């Protein structure tokens, strides 16, 4: 069947199969979600990778075969990813039933070549080009073949399975298996490692940042009338220049900011130009991974291999006039201080967050910024360590790897940063923003955000 034509080319579905783990599923057969899993919720998370002509011109049938066979092996190690996520009738909370239902694997054919695809406009590029998410399968993979021999591979995960760190480990192991390489690690699925303290106790400030909510609240998120999905390229020299501009003079010496701090300061400065003037304040949020920060009872020794969600969010708030008048280095300092409020006491922060969730169960819980409360906001997710060039299944490295959202309503703008596939220090930025913010970024004379083209990815001539 042909999928909905949302652009100037069509994608036709050619085959559907279910891939199960090859080895027996170990105990436990039911995996209780951690409190941090409950905070992340049941949202779909989609990554997509673009490959030029496969190495040695491998036919698409053999590529699909390699992917399915190696996925089956990988699921034996990541057995919860082959399970089902259902609601426990007693606790009224979701849990993973590890019964080897399997992952959904879809194959499709595009009617055009990669060079003709508008990668910049993700609404046109992928909207209507992916088979709708099947809730029965928490992992869904789609291999789309293009007329030029290039391919798209999209991976959609239920967020209850894990976060970006978990999904990157899954993809890397899958690639190691596909290429017949030794496995570099063994995943740890012990969600109980992050269980609440007894008795649970937390700092009252968490009530200001997080909230219990209902599906009605989520469905009625206050959102801009339109959110546009766009893909950008930022070259390495531009990132270095931002970092230089944002350097902080401290006690007569220059304190260099991190790249993500400098980038965030730039976003914040642009943001205040692009919001309705009736707003007096605005916010920026940053996702923080707790794996290197959660301590106690030797847990830090296993967290690096932990599969699940281990995320919190740092939030910076300032008046619009304050950001307008501040230098980019002063804004970078605000960014640093906001993130440090979480990272400098991260162990205490994450255990308090786990305990806050324990107090508010059952039900849905979200950060207030994600729910769109408190005025205009953008959340920045740094995918610096997320694999791009390394996602090689044996037919070559991708020319692009980034994230895409199928969620229809968001309460915040969202910017996701990934390393460029060429390994030259460039970045790929996946953005979900309101039109005025898109206009402000693209009209900025510094030309930091470049709408991505096939030239950036060197697709021509492949």
Image (spheres, rainbow, N blue to C red):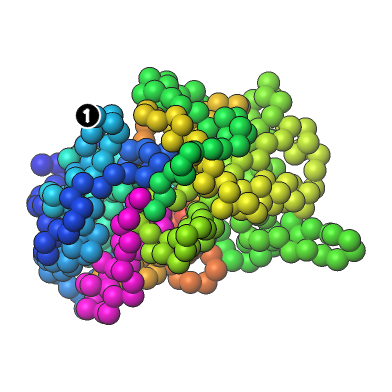
How many dots with numbers?
A: 1
191 is higher (above) or lower (below) than 235: above
Q: Position of residue 340 (x, y in %)?
A: 66, 51
Left-right relation of 315 to 434:
right
Task: Name the residue located 32 percent from the left edge and 44 percent from the top edge.
Answer: 33
Q: Residue furthest front?
A: 199
Q: Up-down: is 424 above or below 25? A: below
Report the side of 10 relative to 364 (left or right). Answer: left
Q: Which stretch appears magenta?
A: 163-192
Q: Position of residue 259 (x, y in %)?
A: 63, 60
Name the one closer to the observer, 451 or 80: 80
Asked if residue 54 can be seen in this view, the reply is yes
Task: Identify the image quadrant of residue 124.
Answer: top left
Along the viewing direction, whichever of 56 and 20 lies nearer the viewer: 20
Q: Is residue 119 visible?
A: no
Where is mark 1, residue-wise? 89
Reply yes or no: does residue 182 show up in magenta.
yes
Please indicate whether residue 3 sits to the left or right of residue 225 in the image.
Answer: left
Task: Tell me the quarter of the image containing the C terminus.
Answer: bottom left
Left or right of 352, for residue 250 = right
Give the percent coordinates (x, y) of residue 108.
Answer: 16, 52
Q: Secondary structure at mark 1?
A: loop
């Amino acid at each position: 069947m042909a999928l909905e034509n949302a652009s100037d080319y069509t994608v036709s579905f050619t085959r559907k199969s279910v891939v199960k783990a090859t080895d027996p599923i170990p105990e436990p057969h039911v995996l209780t979600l951690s409190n941090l899993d409950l905070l992340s919720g049941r949202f779909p998370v989609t990554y997509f990778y673009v490959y030029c002509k496969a190495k040695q011109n491998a036919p698409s049938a053999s590529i699909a075969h390699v992917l399915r066979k190696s996925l089956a092996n990988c699921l034996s190690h990541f057995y919860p990813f082959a399970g089902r996520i259902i609601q426990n009738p007693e606790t009224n909370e979701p849990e993973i039933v590890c019964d080897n239902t399997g992952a959904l694997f879809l194959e499709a054919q595009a009617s055009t070549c990669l060079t003709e695809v508008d990668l910049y406009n993700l609404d046109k590029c992928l909207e209507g080009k992916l088979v709708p998410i099947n809730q029965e399968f928490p992992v869904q993979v789609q291999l789309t073949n293009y007329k030029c021999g290039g391919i798209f591979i999209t991976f959609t995960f239920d967020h209850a399975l894990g976060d970006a760190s978990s999904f990157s480990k899954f993809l890397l192991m899958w690639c190691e298996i596909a290429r017949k390489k030794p496995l570099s690690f063994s995943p740890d699925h012990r969600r109980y490692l992050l269980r609440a303290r007894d008795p649970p106790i937390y700092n009252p400030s968490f009530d200001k940042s997080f909230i219990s909510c209902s599906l009605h609240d989520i469905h009625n998120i206050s959102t801009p009338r339109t959110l546009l999905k766009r893909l950008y390229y930022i070259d390495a020299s531009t990132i270095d220049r931002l970092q230089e501009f944002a350097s902080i003079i401290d006690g007569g010496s220059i304190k260099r900011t991190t790249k993500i701090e400098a980038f965030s300061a730039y976003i914040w400065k642009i943001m205040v130009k692009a919001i309705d003037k009736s707003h007096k304040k605005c916010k920026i949020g940053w996702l923080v991974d707790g794996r290197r920060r959660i301590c106690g009872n030797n847990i830090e020794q296993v967290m690096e291999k932990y599969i699940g969600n281990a995320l919190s969010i740092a939030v910076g708030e300032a008046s619009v006039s304050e950001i307008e008048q501040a230098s980019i280095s002063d804004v970078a300092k605000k960014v640093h201080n906001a993130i440090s409020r979480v990272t400098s006491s991260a162990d205490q922060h994450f255990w308090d967050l786990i305990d806050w969730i324990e107090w508010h169960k059952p039900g849905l819980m979200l950060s207030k910024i994600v729910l769109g409360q408190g005025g205009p906001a953008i959340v920045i997710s740094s995918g610096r360590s997320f694999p791009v060039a390394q996602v090689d299944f044996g037919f070559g490295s991708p020319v692009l790897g980034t994230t895409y959202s199928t969620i229809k309503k968001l309460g915040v703008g969202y910017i996701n940063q990934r390393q460029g596939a060429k390994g030259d220090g460039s970045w790929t930025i996946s953005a979900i923003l309101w039109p005025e913010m898109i206009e402000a970024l693209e009209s900025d004379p510094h030309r930091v955000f470049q709408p991505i083209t096939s030239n950036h990815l060197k697709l021509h001539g492949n």
